[in-house]
Image (cartoon, helix red, strand yellow):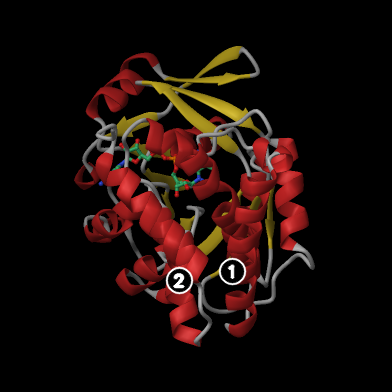
Amino acid sequence: VKIAVMGAGAMGALYGALLAEGGNEVTLVDAWQEHVQAIMEHGLQVETGGCLKTFSVKAVSDPLLLGVQDLVLIFVKSYHTEVVVKNIHHLFHDGTAVLTLQNGLGNADIIAAAFNKATVLVGTTSHGATVLGPGQIRHAGAGDTVVGKYSGKIDQHLSDIAAEFTRCHLNARTDDNIMGVIWGKLLINAGINPVTAICGVLNGELLKAENIRQMAKLLIDEGEAVARASGIELPYNDTFAVLEKVAAATAANRSSMLQDIMSGRATEIDYINGAVVKEGEKCGVPTPCNKFITRLIKELEQRGSDRC
Ligand code: NAD
């Protein structure tokens, strides 16, 4: 299968490496020239549990160098999706599918507005990865890939893609309630990410510090109310109980938003808690806590290290 991965940071590189190892014709596309050059010269190095493995995979920084693909995987941060989709129309023929496994809400809408809705696949991943340096990533935790269709029911094409991902060790399954799955993950991120980023704590503190725990609960409770009012069928009866399990399983981790704030990078807050606020406005459910925390993160983003 011919696959282009748009955004070959932590997750794009991980998925690209495993799909290439399985025999697919993968090209990683990334705007970070040094990273692309390192992959082309030395291969992509993936560290898993202290072991380093080198994957041979093609990488380019300009998508115009590519021809039509069977599958396009979007793995840039959410705030880059709009820019990326503008420059990749030439990668598509009638049968090309485009898949987003990015966190948050809104990416699939941007992609569906740019391409034929019927070809858009959406989902979640619970694999974890981080970039170590140019040409190097760490596969921090193995997980699952859940995929569904943006519009319409699961079909053979989607099932074949999921089977191929599973064959390549990406543990994929299809789900007809994919928006429920996406919202389930969204609410966990909406609870964990901003409070750990603002308080500057590891995920495990959510289980120990009552103030932090209660802040996360307020955010999730609002999100659940929005999901219910929007007709979303959440995958869990008690999302907060799932958050506690995730916090326990990732107790020693820094959330991605904490990492972003610490490194002075933009966060995906607009697509996580900001998306809960936006959806709440559409269905008339108030979301004061999510609104407040979105503003707080945006202020931290803007100030960077410029604080007294
Ligand atoms: P990342 O920052 O490591 O990688 C994004 C890459 O996109 C970068 O290498 C950047 O150079 C590249 N990029 C930016 N603009 C580009 C452009 N115009 N064209 C091509 N490349 C461009 O991010 P990540 O951690 O891999 O996350 C990607 C998505 O996956 C996010 O939505 C994130 O929330 C989600 N996600 C990440 C993890 C994780 O463990 N890292 C887990 C689940 C979901």
Q: Position of residue 216 (x, y in %)?
A: 62, 54
**Side (left or right) of 63 relative to 178:** left
The quarter of the picture showing ligand 1: top left
Residue 96 visible to an observer of this rendering: no
At x 39%, y 38%, the residue is 261
Q: Which residue is mark 2?
A: 277
User: Relative to 102, is 109 above or below?
Assistant: below
Q: Which residue is mark 1?
A: 223
Q: Position of residue 67 (x, y in %)?
A: 28, 49
Q: Quadrant of residue 155?
A: bottom right
At x 28%, y 37%, the residue is 304
Q: Around disc 1, counting alpha carbons within 10 Å, would you say few (fewer than 14), some (14 to 19), or many (20 or more)?
A: many
Q: CA distance from mark 2 to mark 1?
A: 8 Å
Q: Is mark 2 within 8 Å of ligand 1?
A: no
In the image, 305 versus 54, the foreground residue is 305
Name which residue type carries label 1: Gly
Name which residue type carries label 2: Val
**Side (left or right) of 2 relative to 236:** left
In the image, 296 versus 39, the foreground residue is 296
User: Relative to 176, is 33 above or below?
Assistant: above
Q: Earlier in the sequence, mark 2 or mark 1?
A: 1
